[in-house]
Image (spheres, coloured by chain):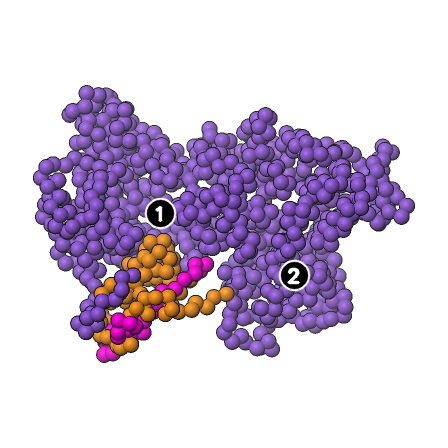
Chain colours: A orange, B purple
Amino acid sequence: MSWVDVGPESALPVRGARVLKIGSLEIAVFRTGTGEVFALRDRCPHRGGPLSQGIVHGRRVTCPLHEWVIDLGSGCATGADEGSTPTYGVRIVDGRVEIDLPASAEARVAALGPPAFAACHRA
Amino acid sequence: MTQLLHEAARPTAQSRRKLVLVGNGMAGMRAIEELLTLAPDMYGITVFGAEPHGNYNRILLSPVLAAEKTIADIMLNAREWYAERGITLHAGDAVTRIDRARRRVVTASGFEAAYDRLILATGSVPVVLPLPGKDLPGVLCYRDIADVERMIEAAQSGRRAVVIGGGLLGLEAAYGLQKRGMDVTVVHLMPTLMDRQLDAAAAGLLRASLEQRGLKFHMPAQTSALVGERRVQAVRFADGSELPADLVVMAVGIRPNVALAKASGIACERGVLVNDTLQTFDPRIYAVGECVQHRGACYGLVAPLFEQAKVVANHLAEFGIGRYAGSQTSTKLKVTGIDLFSAGDFTGGPGTEELLFKDEARGVYKKIVVENDRITGAVLYGDTVDGSWYFQLLRDGTPIADFRDNLLFGQAHVGDSGVAGAGSVANLPDKAEICGCNGVCKGDIVRAISAKKLFTLDDVRAHTKASSSCGSCTGLVEQLLASTLGGDYSEAPAKKPLCPCTTYTHEEVRTTLVREKLKSIPAVMAFLEWKTPDGCHKCRPALNFYLLCAWPGEYQDDKHSRFINERAHGNIQRDGTYSVVPRIWGGVTSPQELRAIAEVAEKYRVPTVKFTGGQRLDLLGVRKEDLPKMWADLSAAGFVSGHAYGKALRTVKTCVGKEWCRFGTQDSTGLGIELERTTWGSWHPHKVKLAVSGCPRNCAEATIKDLGVVCVESGYELHVGGNGGIKVRATDFLCKVATEREVIEYCCAFLQLYREEARYFERTAPWIERVGLTHVRARVVDDAAGRRALHERFLESQRYAQVDPWKERAHGKDADEFTPLHAPVTAVTVEGPSP
């Protein structure tokens, strides 16, 4: 894994997201109303909807296709829905957003596949 | 939801306040479950139950008796459930005394427990008739699992059963015993069955149907004694006659169980007296469920108990906003194959009217009692599909004048979201699809209700997605809930909040933001004390529209509170690409325009080009990054956005009219184009489609549009509130006008009224059904000054709305929206696999 600079914090809209494309891997980079920044794979665990296009509220985003609500911190679906999407580390260095990306193709493969999915703790 | 487990460190048992629940039944446990979702760690909880089980669904005892379910099927919370949540359960050890001074409860076995707060949920006890012989073996009541077990046992040895009481409980007991192989006679004091729920006609049909199933009736008849030596052998009546019996079940009613409360000095009348926060005379002690008397009423049905449970939990969690204001109730009989529903006051009387439908051959009877244009009661027999709809109309006090003609035929004949031809859902096979949007079958829903202990429509929506999209199957899902759970659990909220972020309704939010001159989403949320920091995907788009509508030209549109389609000005497709629909005024185009569209389609390699139902061309499969460039080209060719993606004015569809058509009476294309030029760009609570037909042959399908104009020789007919959506709804005739100028004025006034009054996400059809065509006519047709004012407000709003969003974005507005982030070159050297 390696930290990659993806631009200034101000490039991210508040309560919005932008997409980072690396080959066929698409990562949604979110900024919440309180200024927190999150990076998730831009695919809803339900039917692959682009989470980056959803409405951001609190620490959550609602998928535009079928209204699954995904927790930005864990990548897990909330409510009664079950599933998760991979998350990536984010840090802000001197006002610039850095994302902890898989450095190699192998790692990227791992990040795309099910083994890297976070386990979602729920009742 | 209710099963939330909180793994985080809990406060220690010592530091938490102590909550004791007396009564391990449905009402008390529902209160505990509600409390756990609100404040999971606030109390150390101890539960006492007289019965030696976990908590079970008492309403389903009848199906257990009838051998249609097992005890295991009806358990709600097994002992493990309590243990997992750190709740101490004492099952089978009844509380016998409350020492209020020392705040302790004492049980039959001498165990003591201290409390800071106490909930009494002692339920009710069956009424035992003071007859000679009432204590003989073989005489039972019908209340709990032990009674059912004894009845099942008796059915194995005995042959003849007599059930005293022809009410709901008595009939269910009789049916169950008969299914267990007994020869059953029902004895009833009154001349008709279920006299508190049914009128004589429905009761007659019910009796005939039960007789067909082999039940016998002896009524009216007054029992005078139960006769027998060592066990009961016969029932004796006031006239001296006798009926042999090996088993006698008394099911003549229940009364609140107030013994414990009374002995502890808590004020009781028929039930334990409580206020609107369900506190008893001793404010540390709450009471819920059948033991309660609230504003003079006692309830023996489950929906009110659940509403009470919510209020108690809210109060115990110290939220302090819940109040219980009493309930309307409805009844269903749980006898397989018999559909029966009753609600409200169905007896009628002076000042009321009765609407009746009777078809004896089909065994269908419906009676609706109406007072002052509102439903006050309903009895349905044989066809209860519309029970929940009538109940809703009753609770909401909806005026029925506008659809009274079709009321008895059901919602499918009236509503926008009916369930036409579905019949009784109980008869459907498990594989029958209930929710067409999400592909959910009956079996899926029933399994989820049972396995996940779901009680409400919202629970089912959350867990199965059924009824969560278009909502047209809501009635069916409610029926499935009722038939699976054995009761109508639908809550009767006095008002429905806009979304879970607030307690205020759409209307309250709108009037407040106008009155208080609130001009931004944060201002509205702050003033109305929103429960979430920045709302959710439901309330933010609604607020954005309400503000836009209230403050045209002033309100700063918040694009991040708009659904992606309205933010990207295109329709998002399932693969994340977008579709582009240029506006083609009135559906009339030219070779030059078509050439421009063709060139754009080729230049951007648009995979699919399709005609839409609204006489437009849809370019599908466009990448988001390409949208601004494509719009620039379309804009250069003279096109503006077609708003095919928005809750906005979509299209004005036209036929060719008198310019070409030999039947045409007016210039329908010209009028359609003028209408579209006037109304394009306007935002609405939902999408809006218009049409103009040149003659009553109606080739533009104007009578299934939100507003349709049908031209005739003498002028123009205006029709409103149609749609071709989930359920086709033909328009209602609004009025007829003489000139094109009037068409424009009436149309704008109608659209402005819809913008100002409809709830966000509500199309014109359900809006008109809700407020009534009479109201719309009064505002748009009868009140000329009001109409002109509406028209002017619409035009004022259009001054700011008629800006082409495509052109703006082609010139760089919101460029970030359409541009991906850039990663350094090193990060893009290796291609990942395709998803």
Q: How many marks?
A: 2
Residue occupying image coordinates x 20% and y 34%: B672
Q: Nearer the viewer, residue B216 or B785?
A: B216
**Amino acid type for the residue under numbered disc 2:** Gly
Q: Amino acid at mark 1?
A: Phe
Query: What is the chain letter for disc 1?
Result: B
Q: Return the disc, 1 or 2, that comes first in the chain's sequence.
A: 2
Q: Decide whether residue B654 is among the magenta residues.
A: no
Task: Identify which residue, B52 or B521, lies in the foreground.
Answer: B52
Q: Kindly identify which residue carries mark 1.
A: B761
Q: Is residue B834 visible?
A: yes
Q: Position of residue B141 (x, y in %)?
A: 76, 48
Percent from the top left, x then y, of residue B387? 54, 39
Relative to B28, say whether B386 is above or below: above
How many angstroms separate mark 1 from mark 2 (CA)? 43 Å
Magenta span: A79-107
What mark, if any, has residue B490 been given in the picture?
Answer: none
Question: Which quadrant of the rendered structure holds the C terminus of chain B?
Answer: bottom left
Judging depth in this view, the residue of B753 and B51 nearest the camera is B51
Dot 2 corresponds to which residue? B54
Q: Nearer the viewer, mark 1 or mark 2?
A: 2
Q: Quadrant of residue B417?
A: top left
Extreme right residue here?
B229
Give yes or no for residue A83 being in the magenta stretch: yes
Instruction: Give the residue drawn at x 40%, y 46%.
Output: B437
Q: Is residue B527 visible?
A: no
Q: Is residue B262 above or below residue B388?
A: below
Label 1 sits on a secondary structure element that is: loop
Task: Please tell me which residue is depicted at 59% across the width and 34% down the height of the picture.
Answer: B381
Q: Mark 1, residues whose alpha carbon is within 10 Å: few (<14), some, or many (≥20)?
A: some
Instruction: State if disc 2 and disc 1 touch (CB < 8 Å).
Output: no
